[in-house]
Amino acid sequence: MKITAIRAYQVDLPLLEGSYKWSGGNSVSVFDSTVVEVVTDTGRSGWGEVCPLGPAYLPAYARGARTGIAELAPYLLGMDPLALGEVNRRMDAAMRGHPYVKSPIDMACWDLLGQEAGLSVATLMGGHVGERFALYRAISQESPEAMAGRIAQYRAEGYRKFQLKVGGDPDTDIDRIRAAATKLQRGDVLIADANTGWTQHAAVRVADAVRDVDVYIEQPCYSYEECLAVRRHTNRPFVLDEVIDSLDAVVRGIADQAMDVINLKISKVGGLTRARQIRDLCVSLGIAMTIEDTWGGDITTAAIAHLAHSTPERFLFSATDFNSYGSVSFADGAPQRVDGFLAASHEPGLGVRPRLDVLGKPVLEVTTA
Ligand code: MG
């Protein structure tokens, strides 16, 4: 099998709730997603997706993804997409860094591998564990009362894991965590995700003020060193996210006992190949994971589902179903949330059939023809 063309499609993903707000006054109301089609000489195509959380969250932005794919695609034409190691080495040799550019291409090659093998990506990644896995629900940053009110609403939808977007004024954030905690029922999980928004001293204050609350603290500060200092001050279970952008970062974090859980985002680490490598290391060394991506629609949600569903349950802290946050569906066969749970498709590959009537014409095509 040879790659004969790489196409990219642009799709807007409006949020059902209007907007999504997190630390630093950041918000997004319509996500700009890029769908990638890796076309082969067999007539088969593989599909991937990348959708940064706006340009201010990580060193990634939507138009950068498309520019980077145009830059990288000529190096991949003629390659065997099923040779995932070779594809990743070629991408790394042709372009230093920019993991989010490489992620949808790697994802599309996994889709092709599964289609060709007649096996789901979850099967190729270790097998579907059980029938389904539990999701968390992100709670957009609002007043303490409004955020606490969301807990009952989302629990009624079937979620039992709630991630509060904090990282704002520390006094208000203490109120947010305490107000939300009063709404919890036995078995619920509460996470306070600051998304790098606190200074080190503010983070120590907040963590100390909620030391009697059953809450996880996620990525309090911008740098790894600041987060490590906060970690060493707090007795709360601790999650690292934004700074965990590579296998190296995971190894360092484990060596320093810097976290109990990592947030593993597929595009942040460069695709499913790298995400699986990190997932397997964490399983071997006892670190639990939230498995997700920066954002996305049907294809990203499918890719998350395959990686998460093939992860041993005790190490899968939670996962995300982005396609239920948005109002646009662009692929048939994508997993759909039932209560607070998701399951990966047993169809070959990612199991998605993109709808070209929704995606429209490609905004980019690099081809041998
Ligand atoms: Mg996070």
Image: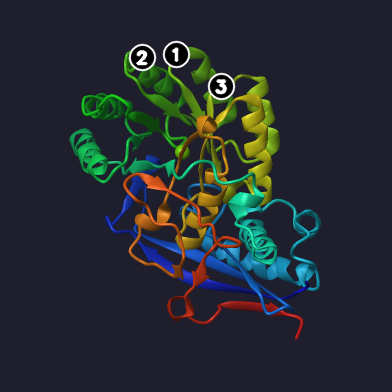
Q: How many marks?
A: 3
Measure how far apart labels 2 and 3 are at the Cα level.
17 Å
- Residue corresponding to mark 3: 228
Q: Sort mark 2 into few (<14), some (14-19) or many (20+) by Cα contacts within 10 Å.
A: few
Amino acid tagged 3? Leu
The residue mark sitting in front, 1 or 3, is 1
- Comparing 310 with 238, the one in front is 310
Mark 2 or mark 1: name the one nearer the start of the chain. 2
Q: Check disc 1 and give the amino acid type.
A: Asn
- Residue at the far bottom: name it: 369
Residue 190 is left or right of residue 240, and the answer is left
Q: Which residue is mark 2?
A: 211
- Which residue occupies the foreground of this view, 100 or 161? 161
Determine the secondary structure under disc 2.
loop
Quadrant showing the N terminus: bottom right
Quadrant in the rendering for residue 195: top left
The residue located at (46%, 50%) in the rendering is 343
* Picture quarter with the C terminus: bottom right
